[in-house]
Amino acid sequence: MGGLEFRLWKLKGLLYYNYSFFSKFTLAKANTPPQAVASLNIQTPYGAPSSPLTILKTPQNTPIAFLSRHGLHHELNPTEVPNRANIAALRSIGVRSIIAFSAVGSLQEYIRPRDFVIPSQIIDRTKGIRASTFFEGGLVGHVSFGDPFDTELAKAVFDIGSDGVLKGEGVKMHKDGLLICMGMVPPETVGWNGRVLTAEGK
C-alpha cells in the first residue's frame, strides 16, 4: 500500500462532491475506476440528505462515501442544501473526514480560473441564512473554529493535486487559502470586500 493510499485508509471514509476529479485521481493512481458497491437511503434527525449515499471502493479496498450535495440532478440551490442532514448521514455510516468542492471566484490575480485552492481558514458570512449548528434544543456545545480545516487531509489532497492529477495547461494547486463564504449581497458590497481584501493581501 503506497503512502498516499495509506493516508486515505487511515481517514476511514471520505466524501467527494466532484466525481470527475475523483475519477481522475483514481485512474491516475491505479488505472482502475472505483467500484460502486452499495447505495444507501438514510434518514437523520435533520431529515434526508441531498441524495442517497453511494459507497465506492478503490482497488485497495478503501471505502469512500459519495454524496451529491446539490442533489442527483443538481436541483438544490445553496440555501436548500440540507447540510446538517448530509453530515449526520455520513457520520452515521462511519465517515469522519470530508472533501468538498466548490466553484468560487478569486480576489487575487495569481489565482486564475481553473486553479484549485485548498483553504486553511474561512470567513463565514452566511449566518441567519440556514441552520448552522447541531447544538440547540437543550444541547449546548462549544466548538473551536480557530482551525476549521483538517491539516493532514489538506496535505494529502495537495499531494494528490501536485502529482499530475490535475490536467490542463497552466492549472495550478494553491494551499493556505482564505475562503469567504457569503450569502446574497448587493454587488457594491462584494466590490467593497474585494478592494479591502486585495489591499490587505489576503
Image (cartoon, helix red, strand yellow):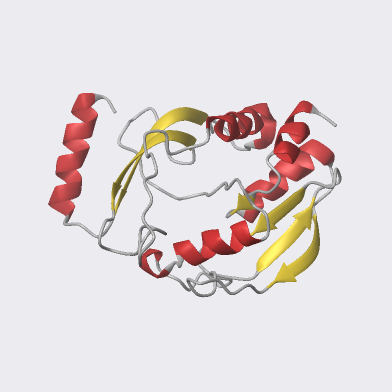
Is residue 106 rendered to the left or right of residue 113?
A: left
Is residue 75 rendered to the left or right of residue 121?
A: right
**How many discs mark residues in the rendered view?**
0
In the image, residue 87 sits, relative to residue 27, either above or below, namely below
In the image, residue 4 sits, relative to residue 91, either above or below, namely above
In the image, residue 171 sits, relative to residue 39, either above or below, namely above
As rendered, which of 11 and 67 lies closer to the eye? Answer: 11
Q: Quadrant of the C terminus?
A: top left
| Residue 43 in sight | yes
Q: Quadrant of the N terminus?
A: top right
Residue 141 in the image, given as x and y percentages of width and height: 38, 51
- Residue at image location 57% in from the left, 55% down from the top: 17
Residue 8 in the image, given as x and y percentages of width and height: 71, 38
- Residue 11: image quadrant is top right
Residue 190 in the image, given as x and y percentages of width and height: 20, 47
Is residue 173 rendered to the left or right of residue 55?
A: left
In the image, residue 132 sits, relative to residue 1, either above or below, namely below
- Residue 126: image quadrant is bottom left
Residue 149 in the image, given as x and y percentages of width and height: 47, 37
Is residue 53 rendered to the left or right of residue 57?
A: left
| Residue 68 in sight | no
- Residue at image location 38% in from the left, 27% down from the top: 110
Residue at the farthest front position: 138
